[in-house]
């Protein structure tokens, strides 16, 4: 059972990262500041949606305001066009389990299926590599350069950063001192003397992880025809 849960979480992590890449390319990197939430709409109440994140964790209340840009089928849309059980990509300022959305987009089911199958822009995670080649989970304790991480498979693991570890939150570089107990962190790295040492540690649920066809970083842009249509006057 734990293995199935882990696979589900990692699949959600991969889809979320890949979907963030697709959205970034279509917007040519011109995304509003904040964090991403990708998940299924479980309820709609007034001007807010309840979203169950693909990466697991508590449901997120996504609040929609007058300035929220809503997109469905690459066309400007309204909150009323979004239905329960649809998958959405939301970006905005997040505070715990609440988000003030600057952007809200309905995700095409076929795209989700392609990403889950490892199609273009998909990123694959091998559950056996958790804690060896990458780390993800909630920070439970910080002791100088060592962090205790509660992983998605219910295991606790101590990791250690070094002088080569970089830190990011959103699009900004931060330092180890900016990381707090309770933060969700993730990043790739390797084992050194039996301890996982991350090359990069990113604070927050998955958002901007861009990979090209060969698996390396890419700033390739999609053709103009693949961008969202401009708002109608």
Image: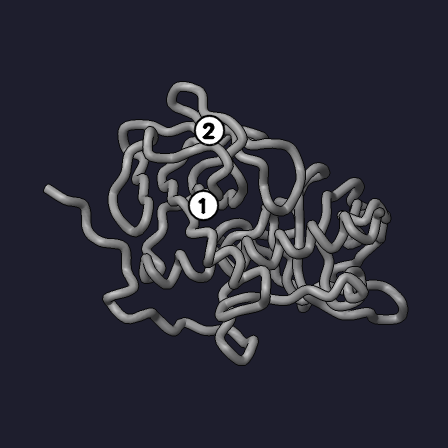
Q: CA distance from mark 2 to mark 1?
A: 12 Å
- Horizontal side of residue 139 vs 80, given as left or right: right
* Residue 222 position in % (x across, y down): 33, 69
Residue at horizontal 73 percent and vertical 58 percent from the top: 135
Residue at coordinates 42% horizontally, 52% vertically from top-left? 108
Q: Left or right of 186: which side holds 194? A: right
Q: Position of residue 174 (x, y in %)?
A: 56, 52
Judging from the image, the colouring scheme is one colour
Q: Which numbered circle lies on residue 89?
A: 1
Question: Residue extending furthest right?
Answer: 194
Label 1: state its secondary structure. Answer: strand
Instruction: Depth check: give the residue in front, 139 or 221.
Output: 221
Quadrant for residue 96, please give it.
top right
Q: Residue 49 got which mark?
A: 2
**Is 185 in front, or is 108?**
108
Location of residue 215 with respect to 17 vertically, above or below: below
Residue 129: x percent and y percent?
Answer: 78, 66
Give the position of the C terminus as an image quadrant: top left
Crowd rating for badge 1 (residues with CA inside 10 Å; few <14, some 14–19, many 20+)? many
Q: Is residue 144 visible?
A: no
Residue 189: tell me if it is visible: yes
């Amino acid at each position: 059972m734990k293995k199935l849960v882990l696979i589900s979480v990692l699949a959600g992590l991969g889809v979320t990262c890949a979907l963030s890449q697709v959205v970034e390319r279509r917007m040519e990197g011109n995304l509003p500041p904040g964090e991403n939430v990708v998940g299924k709409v479980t309820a709609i109440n007034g001007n807010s949606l309840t979203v169950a994140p693909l990466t697991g964790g508590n449901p997120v209340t996504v609040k929609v305001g007058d300035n929220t840009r809503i997109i469905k089928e690459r066309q400007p849309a309204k909150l009323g066009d979004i239905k329960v059980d649809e998958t959405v990509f939301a970006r905005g300022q997040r505070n715990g389990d609440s988000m003030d959305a600057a952007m809200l987009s309905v995700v095409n089911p076929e795209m989700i299926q392609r990403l889950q199958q490892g199609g273009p822009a998909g990123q694959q995670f091998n559950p056996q590599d958790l804690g060896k080649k990458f780390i993800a989970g909630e920070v439970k304790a910080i002791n100088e350069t060592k962090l205790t991480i509660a992983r998605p498979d219910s295991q606790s693991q101590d990791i250690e950063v070094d002088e080569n570890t970089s830190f990011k939150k959103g699009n900004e570089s931060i330092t180890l001192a900016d990381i707090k107990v309770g933060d969700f962190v993730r990043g790739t790295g390797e084992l050194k003397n039996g301890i996982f040492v991350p090359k990069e540690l990113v604070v927050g649920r998955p958002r901007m992880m861009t990979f090209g066809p060969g698996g390396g970083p890419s700033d390739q842009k999609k053709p103009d025809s693949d961008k969202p249509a401009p708002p109608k006057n």
